[in-house]
Image: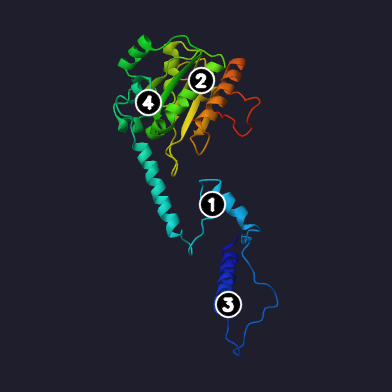
Amino acid sequence: MTEDELRKLVADVVREVVQTAAPTPAGQGAVVREEPPRRGPHHRPLPAPRVASALEAMKASTPARIVTGRTGTRYLTTSYLGLRADHAIALDAVESEIAEGWPEQQGWLPLRTRAKDHAEFFLHPDQGRRLDDASKARCEKEADRGVDVQLIAGDGLSAFALKTNGPALMQALQRHLSGAGFRVGRPLFVKYARIGVQDEIGVLTQAKSTIIIVGERPGLGTGDSLSIYTAYGPKLGQDNAEKDCISNVRDLGFAPERAAARCAALMKDTFKAGGGGVKLTGGDPAFRPHVINH
C-alpha cells in the first residue's frame, strides 16, 4: 500500500467515525449515503455468539484468557489486576527453592549440580547440567546401578511445581513403570537441575534409561506445572532429538496419575524401538509426547 492510499484509507475511516458518532440534527441537512461506508481491508467485525451458554462453557474450559472484554483500547481493570497477579505467581515460582531435608522426606537421594546458588543456576545453564564432585561421588556409591529406568526429580525453573506435584507424580511413575515390568532405581533429587543432568546420572548409574521430572518455565499463573523428560541409552551430551517430553503435568493439565500411565506406555515403545523420539502407539490421542528443544 502506497502512502497516498494509506492516507486516503485513514481519512475515510475518520470521516465515517465522525459521521456515526455525531449525527446531524434533524432539519440541518442530514447526510444521505447512496452506498455503505468504506472499511479498511482488514476490518473484520466480530459476530455476536449464537449461543451465550456455549461461549461461557468455552471460557470455563480453559485458564487461558479468552473473551475478556475491554474498555476502549485497554484491558478491563479486573483483567489487568489478574495479569499482575498471575505474573507475580510466575515470579514466585521461578524464585522458589527446595528446603534442606525435603528430598529425604520423600525417600529421594539428594544431590546437587555445580551451580553454587540460584543466581548462578539462572546465569550459567551449563552448571545445572553436571553434578558437583561430592554429588557425583555419592551417586556412584549410593544410587542403584544397571536398572531399566532411573528416576530423577529436579527443581528446574519452578521448585514450587516439584513440591506441589512431584511426590504424587514420582509415586505414580514408580507404580506404573514397575507394573509395566521395568526395574526402577531409587529416585534421586538434584538441586539446581537442568534437564541435561539426566545424561551424566545415566552414565554414572549405568542405567538403560533415565526419566527426570522438573519444574517447567512458568507461564502466567502456571507456576505448578511439571514436565517429564525421558532418555534411552544415556550418554553425556545426548542430543535432545533422542528424548521425549510429556509436559503440563498438574491438576489443571495432565494429572500426575494419567501422565505416569502414559509415560509407562511411552517407555515400553521406547525400549521396543531401541531409542527415543518415538511415536506413542495406541492410548489417548490427546496425550502425545513431543521431542524437546531446550
Give SS at disc 4. Answer: helix
Question: Circle 1 sits on which residue?
Answer: 66
First of labels 1, 4 by sequence position: 1
Do residues under tags 4 and 3 come within 8 Å of each other at their CB atoms? no
Disc 2 and disc 3 in contact, CB within 8 angstroms: no
Residue 193 lies in quadrant: top left
Q: Secondary structure at mark 1?
A: loop
First in sequence: mark 2 vs mark 1:
1
Label 3 packing within 10 angstroms: few (<14), some (14-19), many (20+): few
Q: Nearer the viewer, residue 105 or 38?
A: 105
Circle 3 is placed at which residue position? 19
| Callout 2 touching callout 1 (CB < 8 Å) | no
The x, y position of residue 281, in whole percent, is 65, 24
The amino acid type, in three-letter code, at marker 3 is Gln
The CA distance from mark 1 to mark 4 is 37 Å
Residue indicated by mark 2: 175
Which of the two labelled residues, at mark 3 and mark 1, occupies the earlier sequence position?
Answer: 3
Please identify the quadrant where the N terminus is shown. Answer: bottom right
Please identify, in this view, whether the residue under mark 2 or under mark 1 is nearer the observer: 2
> Mark 4 to mark 3: distance in Å?
63 Å
Side (left or right) of 53 relative to 75: right
Kindly identify which numbered label has been placed on residue 178: none
Q: Residue at x 50, y 39 (%)?
A: 252
- Residue type indicated by callout 2: Arg
